[in-house]
Each structure stands twice: as structure tokens, then as C-alpha cells.
Image (spheres, rainbow, N blue to C red):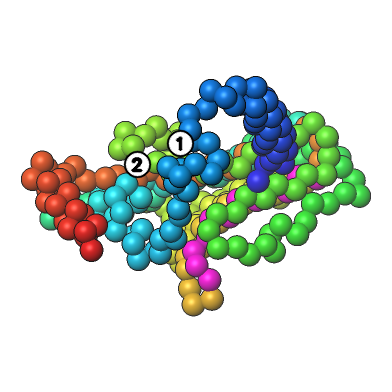
Amino acid sequence: MNRNLSQCGIAAGICALACAWSSSACAAESLASTQAAVPAFLAAGAPDMQPVRCEPVGDDVLAHQTGKYAGSDMISGFVLNVLSQWQLPNGASAVAQGALTVAQNAANQLSATVQTTAHVTDPVPGGTTAANSGATPNTSATGGQNVSVNGVSQITQVAGNGNVGSNAATINYNNSAPQLPVIAGANQPSASASNANGTIQAGIAFGGNGINVTLQTPAGMATQNILPSNAQQAGAIAQLLQVAGNNQQVANQLQLSLQTQQLSAQMIRQAGVLQALRNTR
């Protein structure tokens, strides 16, 4: 998770908690000063007062409730966009991007297309080196690549000053959701690029039911990985930034747009009746 965002979130949470506590204290003081005006049935110990009762509900019940999730039969396709980019202070840059589109036709047949591109710019004569890249000597940012989680992980490790970095992953059900910039290389499952001396590298690959995006620079690396589930663990989406330098600008972006089927009025009524019957069990 982006460290700055995490710190801001913690600060906002503490502030909200403090405000809520302060409001509760004021409300208690106001209630005490007007206790005589409280209706009898709300007074503590009144015979008409009924306590709030809570009953735990299992997953078998929640699974049949409406409005909790989108069933797999509702999804007719999706568009997955991934983009990683790095801007070094000397003007060099690295970009790797890919898109996977899966669509369903009228015969319920699925078709998939993939696009990838990677490019590196290195305006420094002779190629970017550690000395002119903003990399800080004798520092390192490591360890994040060894973290193994199920689900989504976002890790940012920074050793330096003046850096800007972000990990962003979004999932939406908007059929007309905005897409990331258009990719030129169509029907290519992988792409890679590097500068003349190999100090800056960018690569992306679709394969093995997963995706791997990697940017490597003298000041660190940025990666995005989508790993399929197996016998040992569930599937995972991992975004990682490791920056050991100054004045670096890095970003990982992942956008998943789920395409949903348009249901007819008759199908909506049938689904409503079915859900109502299930809820009466």
C-alpha cells in the first residue's frame, strides 16, 4: 500500500474517532440536563423497553441474499488493463502496458484478444548509469518481492527523498468504463525493451494463466503480477514498488472492467421470484 496514503488514512481515522468521542460526550451532557423530558418507555429499566437482540447468520444464509454479489452467469466478458511506468530525473523513462479483452457472442462463445507494448527512452548520451539516474548509493529496497498473499497486495518500499509513487487497482461493472491509453501492439502475448547499456528494462508477458509486468532501473524496480490459483494458494494480484533513489516518479495501475449481460424484464421477474423463494427457507 502506498505509504503516504496509509499514513493519511490513519490520521483521518484517528481524527474521526476523536470527533465521534467528543460528540458522544456532548450528547451525554445534553441528555443528562434534559433527563426529565425523556419518555418513560425509553428510561432505563422501564417495562416497555426492549433490548436489541442480535443473531449470528451463517454463510449458507448470506449466500442467498440479494444485493451482495454478482453471480458468474451475469458476467459476459471483461477488459483487463495493466500499466507500469517510471520517470527518472535525468529524463529517461520506462513503460510496460498490456490489455486482455474477453467477449461473449450471441452463441455464448468466448473470444480473447491480447495487446502488449514496452518501450524505454534514454536521452543521456552513452546510456543511463547509477551516477546520473538519481539512484542513492549504498541504499537498497528489498524484501517485498518475497511476500506471498492470497487476494490483493500493494507494497511500497522507499529509500530516498522527493519520490512520487502509487499502486492503484480498480474493479468496476461499468460497461462503458474509461480505458487506459490505447496499445499499439495487437495479438502479442509479450513485449520487452531496454536502453543501450541495459540499465533500464521494461517487460510484460501474458502466459501460464497469469500476467507479469516488470520495470527495472538503477533506482529500483516496479512489478505487477497476477497469479492463478493452485493447490497451495488462491489466486493473487500483487503490485510492488521498490525505490532506492531520489526524485523518481513511479506508478502501477490495474483496471478490471467487468461486462454484464443486459437482462430482459421477464428474466428479472424470474430471478426475483427465485430469490424470494430461496429467502423463505
Which of the image's four quarters has the C terminus?
A: bottom left
Q: Nearer the viewer, residue 28 or 46?
A: 46
Of helix, strand and loop, which mostly describes the magenta segment? strand
Disc 1 from disc 2: Cα separation: 47 Å
Residue pictured at 32% horizontal, 33% vertical: 176
x, y percent for residue 184? 42, 39
Q: Is residue 238 above or below residue 262?
A: below
Q: Nearer the viewer, residue 144 or 117?
A: 144
Residue pictured at 50% horizontal, 67% vertical: 234
Label number found at residue 161:
none
x, y percent for residue 36? 57, 24
Three-letter amino acid code of the residue under disc 1: Phe
Say whether residue 122 is magenta.
Answer: no
Label number found at residue 173:
2
Q: Is residue 87 above or below residue 257?
A: above
- In this picture, residue 83 sits left or right of residue 133: left
- In this picture, residue 88 sits left or right of residue 192: right
Say whether residue 238 is magenta.
Answer: yes
What segment is highlighted magenta in the picture?
A: 233-244
x, y percent for residue 159? 83, 44
x, y percent for residue 180? 45, 35
Q: Is residue 100 above or below residue 63?
A: above
Which residue is denoted by mark 1 in the rendering? 41
